Image: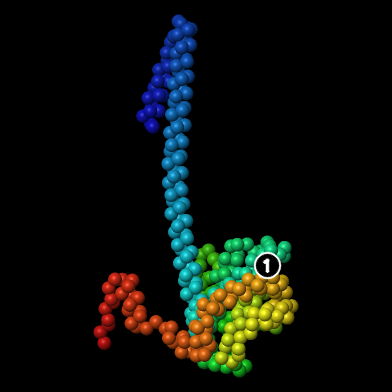
Amino acid sequence: MATRVLAQGATLAAGWLSFTLLGEQSPALAALTAGGWLLAGAGLLVSLVRESLTHASREASRFRARAREEATTLERAIAARDAMIASLAGLADYRDSDTGAHLDRVATVATLIAHTLRQSAHEAATIDEAWIGTLRLASRLHDVGKAGVPDRVLLKAGRLDPAERSVMERHTLIGADALMSTRANATPVDPLIEMAIQVALTHHERWDGAGYPLGLKGDEIPLAGRIVAIADAYDAMTSSRVYRSSVSHQRAAEMIRSGAGTQFDPACVQAFLACEGEIARVMEEARGEGHLAAEEHAAKPAEAAARRTLTIESAREHLRRDLGTPPARKAA
């Protein structure tokens, strides 16, 4: 491009010199020279524009390629983060319920409530698709603090006494504290971590202020916590435990309806009831898939959890498959 510009620039210079020398001797010849000079200038301009457009097109192509590569990297990072969150959430549920199905059901119900609540004018400014997606993941971490509850309390085959109940209630503080530690090391702060802290800390608060651990009341409770409170309570009501039987969807819905304004946010209850048909259908399918695992855990929770523990041999097989060769066994 530079060589072409120099050549055309020389042509222009020669044309200008000719125009100057011939202008007084031959006006007609000078006019022709000026015309050639103008044509050369126009050609130079066209070349410059063409070269600029070609360069811009190449840069745009490189930019699009980099943008696609960065978007792919971001998508992979988000997918990895989501998978790690699911695994972290499963640590507590792994010990306490039917092989993680509880987390799936709570996330499903919470998401359905949020979608319905989004249609109300009161929450339309707060809830969008991104918020609902964050809630779907954050709701899975609501009981992550149960990883810090002793087995004698968490796996007790019966109702908890007051002292044990006090220990159990600390799972809200344990979970929030663990997530706050994660937030302290995150720059910038991830909205998912923020919502997960809210959910872990407040999903046992009550609308009337009689919940725990903070005794928050009404709108003092974050919206995500209010939604998950209903989803968690619904799944608890419709799940069997050693010390009690499950209730039907209809009975659970009626209990949630009666808790509006006392235990639960009335607007969230209204949203739950508006989509309860869809909730009943989805939950029936989910429970059908996890029925045997749920029955096993309800009967013998400690034994069921133990059977899901990774053994030395299964761990060796995982490494053999991933690395292609069996890891060396340590000498005794």
- How far across and how far down the image is residue 155, in percent? 52, 89
Residue 223 can be seen, yes or no: no
Quarter occupied by residue 286: bottom right
What's the colour scheme?
Answer: rainbow
Q: Nearer the viewer, residue 108 or 80?
A: 108
**Mark 1 Cα within 10 Å, few/some/many (few <14, many 20+)?**
many
Residue furthest to the left in view is 331
Q: Secondary structure at mark 1?
A: helix
- Quarter in which the C terminus is drawn: bottom left
Q: Is residue 101 above or below residue 27?
A: below
Q: As shown in the figure, which amino acid type bears the numbered disc 1?
A: Leu
Lateral position of residue 291 relative to residue 252, left or right: left
Taking the spot 60% from the left edge, 90% from the top edge, the residue there is 244
Q: Nearer the viewer, residue 12 or 64?
A: 64
Taking the spot 70% from the left edge, 80% from the top edge, the residue there is 254
Lateral position of residue 124 relative to residue 29, left or right: right
Q: Is residue 124 above or below residue 145?
A: above
Q: Nearer the viewer, residue 181 or 253?
A: 253
- How far across and how far down the image is residue 177, in percent? 55, 78
- Quarter in which the N terminus is drawn: top left
Lateral position of residue 165 relative to residue 78, left or right: right
Taking the spot 45% from the left edge, 57% from the top edge, the residue there is 72
- How far across and how far down the image is residue 322, in percent? 33, 71
Q: Is residue 290 above or below residue 48?
A: below
Quarter occupied by residue 261: bottom right
Name the residue that disc number 1 marks.
Answer: 117
Residue 62 can be seen, yes or no: yes
- How far across and how far down the image is residue 28, in percent? 47, 7
Taking the spot 41% from the left edge, 24% from the top edge, the residue there is 9
Q: Nearer the viewer, residue 27 or 193?
A: 193
Residue furthest to the top in view is 25
